[in-house]
Amino acid sequence: MKSVSRAVAYPGLPVIFAEGYRDAKRRSSWHSHASLALTDTFDRMRTETVAEPLGEGISLTINGKSPSDQRSQATRALIDEIRGLAAVRTGLKITSENHEIVTGSSDSGAAALVLAINDLLEINLSQEMMVKLAHKSSETAYRSIIGGLSECIVAGDRITAKRLAKPSFFDDMLILGIPYDLPRHSADDLHRRVVSHPHYCERTNEVMRRLGELSRIVEEKDLIGFMQLMEADARTVHTMFSEIGLQVIKPKMKEATDLVEGMREDGIQAYWNVAGGSQVYVFTLKKYGKDVTRRLKDKDLRYRNYKVADGAKIIG
């Protein structure tokens, strides 16, 4: 057993959304989904988790606090389950810090946690097993473990994941994030309540069709098609949210998405995405970068540059 292990992982953004729990306690999604791992251009947006042996028990600190909410209880159970796989039984001290993550960090948090404990206790878990375990804390942890563009395949209670494209696939893409200081719905609330939408039962077939389209897009290296598909799925999901009274895209954010859609009328290939938080992402090709950023600046919209990140890794 090592004396310390430090892991880093990057948060993600849905491409084909994972909205809706089949089983909230087990964080099981109703259908398959796909996501990107993201960071800023200098890799500063990340979760870093340190795992160290402890005499007994579990010490969990996240961003300087000892959490006690429902998700942290699931995380403690996950820690206990992983250490139960080790040859040597020991207590664990886990310290996790999120750096410059604007909204949402459960995915990178779960990924860094599993990697750090696996490395510390020298369990040698496969990536497939790490995905399965991390899923118990975050239904989208797979994207932070695998990196790039990845797909999570849901077949009842069976969860598997695979990479669809490396980060280099997106080298010609410019990704901008426009943050808003607005209240947000919790991810758990969105997942639990969206299944009450009268047309939610139709969502699984739509997702399977779009995942098939995504595979074709990757095979054909069609970045415009990728952005079109991502915006279409975001529009579908946010329409469902809005129709059951869960408005994620607030009026100020809607102004930004309208601005992006308006750029296309002038031949600028730009597309938007919004996850569950208060940030609008703008995707375009780098050749349109100057035009897009000029229009954002003209509207006094501050933004931050992002890129597609690689998978979680051990850094010490």
Image: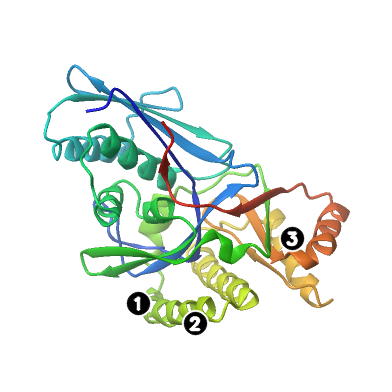
Q: Which mark is residue 255?
A: 3
User: Dot 2, crowdedness within 10 Å: few (<14), some or many (≥20)?
Assistant: some
Q: Amino acid at mark 1?
A: Cys
Taking 237 as reference, is 87 left or right? left
The quarter of the displayed image where residue 19 is located: bottom left
- Secondary structure of the residue carrying numbered label 2: helix
Mark 1 or 2: the one toward you: 2
Q: Position of residue 221 (x, y in %)?
A: 58, 77
- Looking at the picture, tell me which residue is in the foreground, 192 or 100: 100
Image position of 203 (left or right of 170): left
Mark 1, secondary structure of its residue: helix
Give how far across and how far down residue 189 sits, in percent: 41, 52
Tell me which numbered mark, 3 or 2, is placed earlier along the sequence.
2
Whether label 3 touches label 2, CB < 8 Å: no
Residue at left offset 44%, top offset 35% = 315
Sequence order check, earlier mark of 1 and 2: 1
Q: Amino acid at mark 2?
A: Arg
Q: Quadrant of residue 115?
A: top left
Q: Amino acid at mark 3?
A: Glu
Residue 227 visible in the displayed image: yes
Residue 132 drawn at (x, y percent): 26, 54
The residue that label 1 is drawn on is 201
Are the residues tagged 1 and 2 within 8 Å (C-beta)?
Answer: no
**Quarter holding the N terminus?**
top left
Give me the C-alpha separation between circle 3 and circle 1. Answer: 31 Å
Nearest the camera: 144 or 204? 144
**Residue highlighted by disc 2:** 216
Choose top left, top right, bottom left or bottom right for residue 53: top left
Residue pictured at 43% horizontal, 77% vertical: 211
